[in-house]
Image: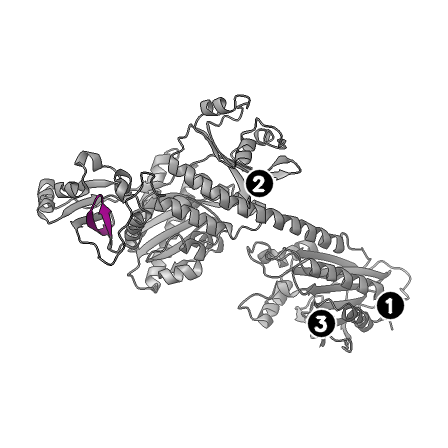
Amino acid sequence: MPAAGDAAGWDAHLDEALTSAVEQCGASSGAVYLLSADEDVLHLAVVRSLPAEFIAPWTRIALTAPTPVGDASREGRLVWSGSQQDFARMYPRIAVTMPYHFALAAAPIRSDGRRRGALLLLWPGNRPPELARAEQDRIATSGRRIAVLLADADAAGHPFTPPSRPRVLPVQLPAAKLPETAASAFAQRLPGGSCALDLNGRITFLTQSACDLLDAGRDQLLGTIPWQALPWLDNPVYEDRYRAAIISREPMAFTALRPPDLWLDFRLYPSADGTSVRITPTDPDPAAPVPVRPEPTPVSRAGQLYQIMHLAAALTEAVTVDDVIALVAEQIMPAFDAQGLAMLSIEEGRFQVAGYRGYTPEEIERFNKIPLDDRTAPMLRALITAVPDFFGDPGELARAHPEVPQVTGKQAWAVLPLITSGRPVGCCLLSYDQPHRFAADERTVLTSLAGLIAQALDRARLYDTKSRLAHGLQQALLPHVLPTLDGLRVAARYLPATRGLDVGGDFYDLIRLGPATAAAVIGDVQGHNVAAAALMGQVRTAVHATAGAAPDQVLLRTNRLLCDLDPDLFSTCLYAHLDLAGHRAYLVSAGHPPPLLRPPGGRTRILDLPPGLPLGIDTATAYPITEVPFDVGALMLLYTDGLVESPGTDLDQAITDLAAQLDRADPDLETAATDLVAGAWHSRQRSDDIATFLLQATPPPDRTPDRTRGVPG
């Protein structure tokens, strides 16, 4: 192992571990993503046998993003996609930007029970779609070896930190058997032209006949990328064929017109270290339309088009303003090598910073609340003209806006107006720590991305406004503080759904009926919107108004009220009358999941209550009372179905598992309540709200018996 302070030595070991993983697993290429310690973002650390340009959109990936490496790292499992069809089904957002034939595996990298990153491996699309057990074991072993390496680096005092740019490993191949002159002579004798490209698409060799066919000299072409050196090859279709060959490792072909009238057939033969290209004259298909000769203005590169497609697909899933800002920070900043971001929205006639990266709070405060009548602000000029501004160095900014102070230390800026449907919604500012030359195609792509960001930001602001309204309504209706009673300890938790408006109709409450009696209620109103939250408030009000009556009468009267209101929604509900002095509980259920009861010193059991219909369906419904012991030390759990229901889960088994979890519950009630929802708390997607309500009988102080003890009648 390298010395503690030898960073290059540790990096070399990581490179060797990736190379070993690719070779032992028979993959064509691979990469290692590392999770930084202070943020939930996976950073691409090192990649083998793939061009750096190909991976630009995925150098930084949010841990929660639906991606193979994100899923593998977050869930601690092997992710396998054996075909293009599998990949499109599993990850449709990414598949839009990678329409190639390949197989993929992502394995988690974990050490000491901690997430460290993920190993990504790619195979050509012609491999078998199924992953054999031995292959699974080799992939998992490779991930564990990298995890051990990371742990060793930690122990040596040199923990791995994600690099600012990923390392692209060269492929070491055995020396050629033919002398270079002999190989060159062999290629020269072949009909047509021949050339070789490295993994980054640069020409490393070409024959004189290839130069003649391409109508360019060897010195003009060596070391260049063909579609950049030859304007008539600057077409996304041609570059796409090259990408397809590199990723799928399958031969590809295309036909191009070399002005004025020479058609050339290009055949691409990829391998682990590059691509061999055969170029021959050909006759065009007489039925095919003759393409128009390219204009001097270059067409956008395939990589840039994919960047737009990738971000467009990602932005369709962005829900909140924070989601939009995170996507811009994780996708656009690394792709365009920016170090700073300020997203400004328009609020009440001023700019308001909605989010930022790469600035200090003191620096960003200068952007905050810039009035829209401040004609000196570059952001305002961009909004008025609807044209982005690009300043490659401080001198350019000073010439255009001499009155703007330069106090942040940034050296270049892209000011992108965010306009949708002709209406300004804000401004996106990208900044650079060093002077930056904005090429024409880069400006074009950033301008296109600004339109996508504007639409997403506008949708997200509307969503956030509705969400704040709904959450405000819900929080006003849920109890802020539960009453305290001698002889009873309680703890409750509520988690909203992560879909819709993140607001719903789950509720709970504790109502004091007397010194030693109380009513506990939990319910679940259908839906996740403002209407559900409003109906929840009506149900709680009805229960409060009738609490103290017999439990069956409480639900009967509440049910009649909901039927009279006819809200087109229904609600499940469970009502428990607690007689703490008599150590009894009287329960009624309106279609609600069964409560759990753990008696003192015993095992948890599922209480079998006769379920009535949910509230709001039928006024003639009856709600039978079930009486159970509630002795000192007994623990009762009331919950909503979001805690136990999920797609593909057996409900009865889930409730049984919940009972086993209650058997192991922490003696501290607050800790126990948190533990019950811990799994759901960290889940990225919750399709339903979750409410839990723990009730534990404790020894009451000696006092005059409560005249309200027993079940009211």
Left or right? Give the position of 330 relative to 261.
Answer: right
Identify which amino acid the numbered label 1 is placed on.
Answer: Arg
- What residue lies at 67% left-to-right and 71% top-to-bottom? 606
Which amino acid is tagged 2? Answer: Pro
- Residue denoted by label 2: 424
Q: Is residue 268 magenta?
A: yes
Q: Nearer the viewer, mark 2 or mark 3?
A: 2
Q: Residues within 10 Å of mark 3 (few under 14, many from 20)?
A: many
The crowding category of the residue bearing disc 1, from other C-alpha atoms within 10 Å (few below 14, some 14 to 19, many at least 20), is many
Magenta includes 36?
A: no
Residue 212 visible? The answer is yes
**Which residue is tagged 1?**
709
Of mark 1 and mark 2, the one earlier in the sequence is: 2
User: Are the residues flagged by discs 3 and 1 in contact, CB closer than 8 Å?
Assistant: no
Instruction: From the top left corner, tell me how far across and down residue 453 is, in percent.
Output: 51, 44
Residue bearing mark 3: 614
* Residue 629 visible at all: no
Q: Nearer the viewer, mark 1 or mark 2?
A: 2
Q: Position of residue 273 (x, y in %)?
A: 24, 46
In the rendered structure, which segment of residues is drawn in magenta?
A: 255-271
